[in-house]
Image (spheres, rainbow, N blue to C red):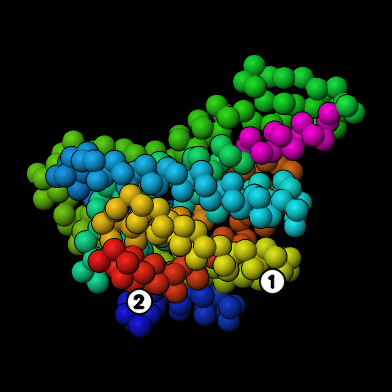
Amino acid sequence: MQNFLDPAILFFVFGIAAGLLRSNLEIPPQIAKFLSLYLLMALGLKGGFALAASGLSPAIAASLLAGMIMAFVVPVLGYAFLKNRVPKFDAAAVAASYGSVSAVTFVTAMQFAESGGIAVGGHMAVAMVLMESPAIIVAIVLANMLRRQQVAGTQDVRLTAQGTLVSASPGNGNPAMSIREVLHESLTNGTHLLLLASLAIGFLSGESGKEMMKPFSADLFKGMLAFFLLDMGLVVANNLRDAKGKAPILLAYAVCSPFVHAALALLLAMLFRLPAGDAALLMVLSASASYIVVPAVLRYAVPEANPSVYLGLPIGVTFPINLLIGIPVYMAAATAVLG
């Protein structure tokens, strides 16, 4: 109930309602972009300040390692489940989206934890950065394997210098991206780069930087988050209409997979003996799905996949489920199991 009464969540719900009612309420795109950049900068600074205060201890290293493990496990399991149920390129793309992370979900979870008095490590922002790209790499490897299967024995094939298989037959207008190109595209994405820079600046400036930036990165944060979630509610309402026509198995995956992934993350947190706060955020990251960075990369890396599937489901179905139901469930589970 506490999550539903949070002003930021209430604005999110209002945004969904306004969108479904086809209201003309809208947030100008440039303002929405500014809010997104602000939240990433504030989150990065908070993580950097926390990392500067604590240092890279074995406990922090364990949390980061657990995040990296989940970043590979989730897309592999997702593809294994979907590959014989939907077109294989769609399966690879959906697995990548669900294997990566949502910064907005993570930011909301951080705010929820702080409001509930749950101690969380700012270093988990580093884990979020580390968990962004592995799923994309898995998707590219899978897509290249699928292309190899398609062209084997029937088409002339050439191998690029980067190791990417490309059909030389007429009509192939979308040569595949190499893993090196994908990593460059992901790591130099503007929002990702801003988060990395903010983490570094927070770490280097330490406690003095924290005090100087407090009015920006702390005092304004809650209001900015509420404004941004209002816009996200409007976006979700638009994508809900797209999600209606999807295959039942995809809708079931979008609804159920976050809780399965969160449960796996909790088991890993127990194995690594993570603190409850870190475990809760690991569950949130594992349960979330990317609808910004990953779809932008997949558009060029896996052009055979249907964008409405790997974009519409994460933002139209999984994102609101995580915000309204998932985050309090993951926090309660981590606290109950790990204290």
Give the side of residue 127 with respect to residue 202, left or right.
right
Residue 291: image tag = none
Label 1 vs 2, first from the N-terminus: 2
Where residue 60 sits: x, y (%)? 26, 44
Nearer-the-camera pick, 236 or 119: 119
Q: Is residue 29 above or below residue 6?
A: above
Residue 147 in magenta stretch: yes
Q: Secondary structure at mark 1?
A: loop
Residue sitting at x 85%, y 22%? 156
Quarter of the figure with the C terminus: bottom left
Q: Is residue 149 above or below residue 27?
A: above
Where residue 56 sits: x, y (%)? 22, 39
Mark 1 → mark 2, Cα distance in angstroms:
26 Å
Which amino acid type is marked by label 2? Asn
Name the quadrant containing residue 167. Answer: top right
Where residue 312 sits: x, y (%)? 62, 61
Residue sitting at x 44%, y 74%? 324
Q: Is residue 175 above or below residue 107?
A: above
Q: Is residue 65 above or below residue 16?
A: above
Magenta segment's dominant SS is helix
Q: Which residue is mark 1?
A: 244
Please tell me how crowded label 2 is: few (under 14), some (14-19), or many (20+) other residues with Cα within 10 Å: some
Please state the extent of the stretch shown in magenta in the rendering: 140-152
Q: Which residue is mark 2?
A: 3
Which amino acid type is marked by label 1? Lys
